[in-house]
Amino acid sequence: MASTDRGKLLEAIAVTAELTGTEMSQAAARIMADDLGAYPLPPVLTALTRCRRELKGRLTIAAVLERIDDGRPGPNEAWAMIPQDEEASVVWTEEMAEAFGVASALLREGKTIAARLAFIEAYTARIAKARDARTLPRWIPSLGRDPFGREVVIRDALSRGRLTHSQVAGLLPAPITDAGNAIANRLEFARIAHAKR
């Protein structure tokens, strides 16, 4: 972290500590800055702002970490993204995939509520572990059988920055060119002519 960013972070920690009624030594603020320095500065500053508004008790590192938006969806949003059958495609985090593994047997049995609860519990534990290890989310595609659904999901993930162009290069259909359109038109014309015979 650049020294100017570290200065901003230390200042934000000091202000947040003061406004939440937390006594904090300079050494403690430096340690907190070290722990939070593993994350990009903007989401950390946003998390500290949320702490100033939301905390009713002392400022802790855990309180800040809980409020850092690291790009992982919340448990309910993650559950809503889960495919309901093998036709559907999804781009999900490793934690979502692992939590789905815990809940999938319950889903197959038709126990949707139990599956949701199992998923949320497993997902919450896994994202807490990932955040403790300071790992950023890793998005991976899981392609269903519906090729049209794949394209929509992959393009959405690409537009959100969850996947890169190199990751999706072989997953999307080739763009239709003028030559491709001409061939398709000839084939359709031949099909219609053959049907009229």
Image (cartoon, rainbow, N blue to C red):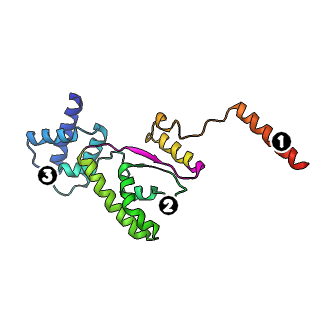
* Badge 1 amino acid: Ala
Crowding at label 2, few (<14), some or many (≥20) Cα neighbours within 10 Å? few
Task: Give the number of the mark in front: 1 or 3.
Answer: 1
State yes or no: residue 24 in magenta: no
* Residue at disc 2, secondary structure: loop
Residue at x 53% of width, y 41% of height = 171
Q: Position of residue 73 (x, y in %)?
A: 38, 51
Q: Position of residue 78 (x, y in %)?
A: 40, 55
Dots 2 and 3: beta carbons under 8 Å? Answer: no
Which image quadrant for residue 41?
Answer: top left
The residue beneath circle 3 is 21
Does residue 50 appear in this view?
no
* Badge 2 amino acid: Gln
Segment colored magenta: 134-149
Task: Give the number of the mark in front: 2 or 3.
Answer: 2
With 144 as the anchor, is 54 left or right in this view?
A: left
Report the Cα–Cα distance between label 1 and label 2. 40 Å
The residue beneath circle 1 is 190
Q: Earlier in the sequence, mark 1 or mark 2?
A: 2
* Residue occupying the far right of the picture: 197
Q: Which mark is residue 84?
A: 2
